[in-house]
Image (cartoon, rainbow, N blue to C red):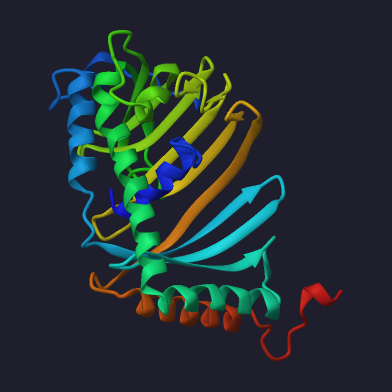
Amino acid sequence: MTRAKLIRIATAVFLGVSLTGSSATPLGAAARASLLADSASAIELVRAAVANEVAANDDSIKHMFRSRKQTPQGSQTRLYVETRSAMAGMTIAYDDHPLTPEQKQGEENHLAGLVNDPEQLSRKHSQEQQSAERTLRIVKALPEAFFYDNDGDEPGAAHLGKEGTRLVRLKFRPNPAYEPPSRVEQVLEGMEGFLLIDPTSRRIARIDGTLFKEVGFGWGILGHLDKGGHFLVEQSEVGDGSWQISRMSLGFTGKILIFKSIVIKSEEVFSDFRRVPADTTFAQGVDMLKAEEAKLAEDDKPTAGTTDPKSH
């Protein structure tokens, strides 16, 4: 799991404050034994998968990719490049329409400000690292925070695990003996759901969690998340041997500092992953973003002899 992926999960789970899915296909005893042949139990499979996720937190593998995020207010499409300094990102569309010249200039000015201000870029890098470290603590807590039960399997797909692979489905529920070492892990006390794990590569393909009770932060003083809150994160193998987040769905309500309401509802899809050099600088990442945006804009232009359907 790269630093960028951890940052995105941190945004999902902690919502900036610290912060049951599809049916399974029943398995016969023989098939289940085959899928779990290398694991003596569900918890051992979880431990192996978590160990691999932690080991995959390798900043030497970097990508350019695209995201489209849908909220009740509309959609936003962005391009990203992972660089050695921080994540470079640029919005290229709102509600599937290209930016206006003024909006595009605003994006470029923001990126130029980061390129030309090492102190601001350093703060961005530090914030990303802190978010990644908090989320890594959540990932490491998964084996101890929950009890797991086998619950059949589901097929892998292009956006989920590996296409053609059967994914082991494990239901989870809180372990009452688990004591969160900090408020970062407190959210796990009120969560239940299921994991999908690739039993061959020992990687997590999906985490689907629902809050079955209200979860407070800082003894409820800092805030809380309401019962019924839901998040889903999916990963897939992107063709070069590495795994990346392919989808993230959030639905939370609650309060921060007792008085300020939280309403988070979004669906985000990540696609078009391409490797970039591991030593890519932030300035080089910005140049890649501009080049890709220009290419996409050119590809979207009507060809000679055709009529733009938007004109009708």
In front here: 153 or 275? Answer: 275
Above/below status of 81 relative to 176? below
Q: Position of residue 141 (x, y in %)?
A: 27, 27
Quarter of the figure that contains the C terminus? bottom right
Relative vertical location of residue 104 with respect to residue 238 in this rendering, above or below: below
**Residue 200 visible to an observer of this rendering:** yes
| Picture layout, residue 134 above or below residue 291 | above
Along the horizontal axis of the image, is 46 left or right of 134?
left
Question: Residue 303, image x and y in percent?
Answer: 66, 87
The residue furthest right is 312
Q: Say whether residue 160 is left or right of residue 265.
A: left
Q: Residue at x 36, y 18 (%)?
A: 172
In which quarter of the view is residue 238 placed? bottom left
Quarter-wise, where is residue 100 in the image?
Answer: bottom right
Can see residue 165?
no
Q: Residue at x 33, y 8 (%)?
A: 176
Query: In x, y percent, where is residue 236?
Result: 36, 48
**What residue sits 23% from the left and 69% below the top?**
278
Q: Residue at x 49, y 20 (%)?
A: 215
Image label count: 0
Residue 238 placement, left or right of 39: right
- Residue extending furthest top? 176
Left or right of 183, for residue 296: right
Q: What is the x, y in percent for residue 17?
A: 49, 37
Residue at the bottom extreme of this rendering: 304
Decide: is 238 above or below 208: below
